[in-house]
Image: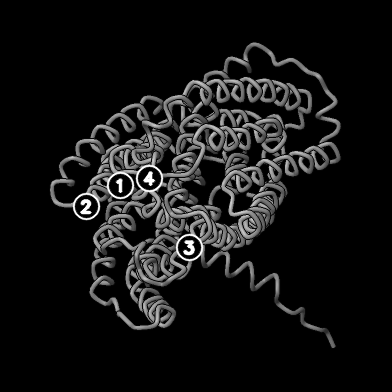
């Protein structure tokens, strides 16, 4: 496995993600301060709707990038070029589908925003601007995936993240100068255009030979690509329906004001989750090449290592999230520091548990995308999405009998049940059966043990929470408590996983050999 390039991909991704986390939080703070939390909720609704429309793209990138691994390893530039040309055409078609879908959906926007009439915002203009910013990215997505297929994720990450940082900087500036939501959205379009220009320059310099070849894909490879695209599309549609449906249901049934409040918690949880997920996603091409070159036994050992590593990261970060999230929301988004944007602790508890359970799928999803086994569980997402939506709507009414805010708990509870009893069962089974060729029994036991271990630690942390007059002091104290509490489940996990200890020991030994000073001869 190309550990050096994998390490570089991870480090660059994490550094940029941390910068983006800070920039995103600051941008949202100023959006709430200068335009209002209701408009913040509307912006979150647009993001969810566009995420749903982008389901047309889901699977194309992963499926075709997976098909590129073998010809890249074999040095078959003509086949890589043919796949790139196919990829480019598909993305243009996808962009057209999303544009059409956005235009069709536009007249119905008012039904998704329960209390839109109270906002001084042009729904149709602002949605059209959000749609335009997303469509521009499809004009250079093929080139981004070409970079990733060659294991140079750190380059595409730097370009994409720099574009997003530019957007945040411009948005903060125009919020100060104009207090306009329209100009806020125009900044995203300008940043996307700049990102497109840089991507064109970089790919033409690095892969000019590939881009110059106008090859046609052979029927056999085309059939394999179409099969993988269809499978990945069906596989990821469940994730879109789950994540998008939650926000849309809250907005449609409870209003954009409550969605704005909820989105403040979610933007931090999502940013945190996506940041630590970058310890996995940049390694997809590395694992993909490993799958081509080595045996299933090697994959199994690496999977066990990444699964425990998955838990270690999740335990530290999500216990920390639960400990300090109320303080972060108040400090970043509530300029008057009144606590008016806070949920009750029971809502925070289920949000934390939900994101941890979803994050615990990272290891299997990394190996699934890298090995192409997404074809074999292609019907699972349809069941996942349907069950989640049905449960969410039912729980909104059921939990709403207790309290309106408790309705949010119902929506999240539906997502938790969907993940536990569908995703965490089907995905490992398919991966083990078709790529690793080994029984997943040990994986199941360890996985649900880890989830139960985290839930117990979360309950313990709840009773250790300290309230103080100063939000900053409270954040620091509770953050330290969370780190201390997280050491207990982490120690238990490490002591019970021999594969994890073996790989850590091997990495430590390589590091020592690399930095060992040579002995001088007399």
Q: CA separation, marks 3 and 1?
A: 21 Å
In the image, residue 372 above or below residue 121: above
- The residue lying toward the viewer, choosing from 522 and 209, is 209
Quadrant of the snapshot with the C terminus: bottom right
Name which of mark 2 and mark 4 comes first in the sequence: 4
| Residue 165: % across, % down | 66, 55
Name which of mark 2 and mark 3 comes first in the sequence: 2
- The residue lying toward the viewer, choosing from 106 and 233, is 106
| Residue that label 2 marks | 406
The residue sitting at 24% across, 65% down in the picture is 456
**Closer to the observer: label 1 or label 4?**
4
| Residue that label 3 marks | 502
| Residue that label 1 marks | 444
- Categorize mark 2 by other alpha carbons within 10 Å: few (<14), some (14-19), many (20+): some
Asked which secondary structure carries label 3, the reply is: helix
In the image, residue 198 above or below residue 264: above
Circles 1 and 2: CB distance less than 8 Å?
A: no
**Closer to the observer: label 3 or label 1?**
1
Name which of mark 3 and mark 1 comes first in the sequence: 1
The residue sitting at 41% across, 83% down in the picture is 473
Identify the residue at the far top of this view.
Answer: 219
Circles 1 and 4: CB distance less than 8 Å?
A: no
């Amino acid at each position: 496995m190309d550990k050096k390039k994998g390490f570089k991909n991870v480090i660059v991704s994490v550094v940029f993600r941390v910068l983006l986390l800070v920039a995103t939080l600051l941008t949202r703070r100023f959006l709430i301060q200068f335009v209002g939390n209701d408009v913040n909720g509307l912006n979150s609704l647009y993001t969810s709707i566009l995420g749903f429309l982008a389901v047309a793209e889901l699977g194309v990138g992963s499926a075709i990038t997976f098909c590129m691994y073998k010809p890249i390893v074999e040095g078959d530039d003509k086949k890589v070029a043919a796949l790139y040309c196919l990829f480019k055409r598909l993305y243009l078609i996808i962009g057209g589908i999303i544009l059409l879908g956005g235009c069709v959906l536009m007249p119905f926007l008012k039904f998704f925003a329960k209390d839109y009439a109270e906002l001084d915002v042009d729904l149709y203009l602002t949605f059209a601007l959000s749609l335009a910013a997303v469509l521009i990215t499809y004009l250079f997505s093929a080139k981004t995936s070409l970079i990733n297929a060659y294991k140079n994720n750190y380059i595409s990450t730097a370009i994409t993240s720099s574009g997003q940082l530019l957007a945040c900087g411009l948005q903060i500036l125009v919020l100060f100068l104009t207090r306009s939501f329209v100009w806020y959205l125009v900044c995203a379009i300008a940043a996307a255009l700049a990102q497109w220009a840089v991507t064109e320059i970089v790919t033409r310099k690095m892969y000019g030979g590939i881009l110059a070849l106008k090859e046609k894909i052979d029927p056999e490879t085309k059939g394999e690509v179409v099969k993988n695209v269809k499978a990945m599309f069906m596989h990821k549609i469940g994730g879109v329906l789950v994540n998008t449906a939650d926000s849309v249901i809250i907005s449609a049934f409870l209003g954009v004001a409550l969605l704005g409040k909820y989105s403040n918690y979610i933007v931090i949880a999502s940013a945190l989750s996506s940041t630590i997920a970058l310890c996995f996603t940049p390694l997809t091409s590395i694992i993909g090449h490993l799958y081509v070159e080595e045996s299933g036994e090697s994959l199994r050992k690496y999977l066990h290592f990444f699964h425990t590593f998955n838990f270690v990261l999740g335990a530290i970060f999500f216990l920390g999230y639960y400990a300090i999230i109320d303080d972060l929301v108040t400090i970043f988004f509530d300029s008057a520091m009144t606590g008016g944007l806070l949920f009750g602790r029971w809502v925070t508890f289920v949000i934390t548990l939900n994101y941890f359970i979803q994050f615990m799928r990272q290891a299997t999803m990394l190996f699934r995308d890298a090995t192409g086994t997404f074809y074999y569980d292609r019907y699972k997402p349809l069941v996942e999405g349907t069950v989640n939506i049905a449960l969410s709507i039912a729980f909104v009414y059921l939990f709403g009998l207790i309290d309106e805010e408790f309705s949010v708990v119902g929506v999240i509870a539906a997502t938790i049940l969907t993940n536990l009893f569908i995703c965490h069962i089907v995905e490992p089974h398919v991966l083990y059966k078709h790529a690793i060729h080994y029984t997943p029994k040990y994986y199941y036991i360890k996985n649900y043990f880890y989830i139960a271990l985290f839930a117990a630690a979360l309950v313990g942390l709840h009773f250790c929470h300290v309230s103080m007059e100063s939000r900053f002091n409270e954040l620091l104290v509770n953050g330290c408590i969370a780190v201390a509490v997280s050491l207990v489940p982490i120690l238990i996990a490490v002591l019970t996983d021999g594969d994890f200890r073996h790989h850590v020991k091997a990495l430590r030994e390589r590091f020592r050999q690399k930095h060992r000073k040579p002995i001088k001869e007399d």
